Image (tube, rainbow, N blue to C red):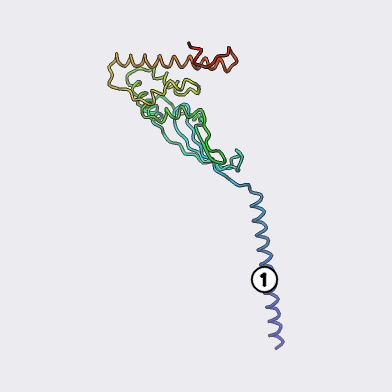
Amino acid sequence: MAERKLMSDVLRTLYRWTNRRSVRWAAAVGLLIAVVCLASPPVSTFRFHSVCVQCGTLKATTAWQVSGSRMTLYSQSTESESALSRVLREAGLVQPHEHRWDFTSGRGNGIRCALGYGRYFARAARSDTFADMVAMLHDRGEFTFRDRILSVSRRQDELHIAYEDLVLYPVDDSMDSAELQTWIDEQSAQIDFWERVAAAQAQRDRGGAPVKSAVNVLY
């Protein structure tokens, strides 16, 4: 009888001790979780796009950042070939290189729309029309004008307007040599015009003679 009573007392004591221990463990775990949650800042995502200014390859990036700041905790990117990068690669116009990324656009983490100057070249890189034009000029041996429109497409000033028509309107690749030369002369004149516009704007930005606009100085 005494042994049974002793055993019962031991079991009750063990139960109470275990129960209190569980409560203590639960409280400790809860406190730890609360501390971690308070110490860890909220995280937001910022998604943006870039273009390699050398070959036209495109990159999409997702960055996990501390909310309200540009502090990036982790990022993940994927690269994709553009219409232009394919043409440049197939024509042997670019060699293996380390990409030089230029920001095009992005949004997230409190930013509704961020735009970069790289968006001008990205537009040309994505354009099948522009890529076909570069390929046509290359195939027909018009290397000087080919290189010129590629240079123009990379510009980050008013000169980017010069290739708007090149991007928007397909060129007739069945033109004979004389027709092709006429078309090249017309496009070259347009590029010359916008080069003067860009030069006038650069002069104004450097604090040169004041002008009403970058275009007015030409007249």
Lateral position of residue 149 relative to residue 34, left or right: left
Q: Position of residue 166 (x, y in %)?
A: 38, 23
Judge the density around disc 1: few (<14), some (14-19), many (≥20) Cα neighbours within 10 Å. few
Residue 186, compared with residue 134, is above or below; it is above
> Outermost residue, front direction?
212
Lateral position of residue 3 relative to residue 101, left or right: right
Q: Position of residue 192 (x, y in %)?
A: 44, 14
Closer-to-camera residue (109/30): 109
Closer-to-camera residue (189/145): 189
> Outermost residue, bottom direction?
1
Q: Residue at x 57, y 40 (%)?
A: 110
Q: What element does badge 1 sit on?
A: helix
Lateral position of residue 194 relative to residue 19, left or right: left
Q: Residue at x 54, y 17 (%)?
A: 202
Q: Residue at x 58, y 46 (%)?
A: 43
Q: Position of residue 199 (x, y in %)?
A: 51, 15
Kind of residue indicated by mark 1? Asn
Q: Quadrant of the N terminus?
A: bottom right
- In which quadrant of the rendered view does residue 207 lie? top right
For mark 1, what is the residue?
Answer: 19
* Numbered disc total: 1
Residue 19, compared with residue 44, is above or below; it is below
- In which quadrant of the rendered view does residue 182 lie? top left
Residue 214, compared with residue 119, is above or below; it is above
Closer-to-camera residue (199/133): 199
